[in-house]
Amino acid sequence: LPGIEEVAWLPVDAASLGLGNTGDDVRLVQDGQVVEAVTYIPAWHHPLLAESRGLALERRWPEAPVDAAGSWSTTVAPEGGTPGRPNAIYQDPGGGIPGVQKPEEAMTILPAVFSPDGDGRDDVCLVRVQVLEAPAVVRTRIFDAEGRLIRTLGEADFSGHDHQAIWDGLDDTGERVRIGRYLVLVEAFFATKKISRSYKRSVVVATPLGP
């Protein structure tokens, strides 16, 4: 291409495509014309990640300009990328949460009443939050009725839109908590390193009434 000193031609079905940590240019060319071009900038990775090696950058909004820094971030896919599949951090440009129609549906706890007594029935509860923006660093904590922190389920979990955590009814010392009502607080930290959104819902630890 005119004006480009070095060009690396790579087949579209390449098993992997690695870009230099200091930044590289990527151009999509069709019939000699540049259809799309972007400069890979390492700083586009999520700033709260200690290590981004092996993790792909993905676009949150494919409809946004390709060089818009805010539309790129680190994938949350466990395998490090989603080639040939929808981006793991895709977000509806309209601001909606995938699969959530109402704000109160963003956080669910199932079952809302559970009995961690080891009998094989309702021994744990599933905390699930549909995070508005992805990726996010998520902290999940549980407080008792007096507002005391009794369990941290995750201090800095790297998460996509669907964040899940399991509570087994134990506190941070490994002891089973008393029966009663507890508050589950989930906080999502976005690229600004500030708490962008928090979710909270109560859960009850109980004892089975009968067989």
Image: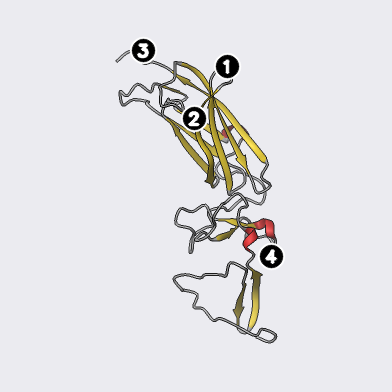
Q: Disc 3 or disc 1, which is closer to the eye?
A: 1
Q: Mark 4 and mark 2: span between their CA atoms?
A: 39 Å
Residue drawn where x is 48% and y is 39% of the image: 164
Counting from the top left corner in percent of width and height, residue 207 is at 38, 15
Q: Mark 3 and mark 2: span between their CA atoms?
A: 21 Å
Label placed on residue 72: none
Furthest residue toward bottom: 2
Q: Disc 3 or disc 4, which is closer to the eye?
A: 4
Q: Earlier in the sequence, mark 3 or mark 2?
A: 2
**Circles 3 and 2 in contact, beta carbons < 8 Å:** no
Q: To which residue does mark 1 refer?
A: 146
Q: To which residue does mark 4 refer?
A: 67
Label 4 secondary element: loop
Three-letter code for the amino acid on which mark 3 is drawn: Leu
Q: Earlier in the sequence, mark 3 or mark 4?
A: 4
Q: Mark 1 and mark 2: span between their CA atoms?
A: 21 Å
Residue drawn where x is 66% and y is 52% of the image: 93
**Circles 1 and 2 in contact, beta carbons < 8 Å:** no
Quadrant the C terminus occupies: top left
Q: Is residue 117 left or right of residue 205?
A: left
Q: Mark 4 and mark 1: span between their CA atoms?
A: 49 Å
Mark 1 Cα within 10 Å, few/some/many (few <14, many 20+)?
Answer: few
Quadrant the N terminus occupies: bottom right
Q: To which residue does mark 2 refer?
A: 109
Counting from the top left corner in percent of width and height, residue 149 is at 55, 25
Three-letter code for the amino acid on which mark 1 is drawn: Glu
Q: Earlier in the sequence, mark 3 or mark 1?
A: 1
Q: To which residue does mark 3 refer?
A: 209
Q: Earlier in the sequence, mark 4 or mark 1?
A: 4
Counting from the top left corner in percent of width and height, residue 181 is at 51, 18
- Depth order, front residue of 167/21: 21
* Residue 1 versus residue 115 in the image, above or below: below
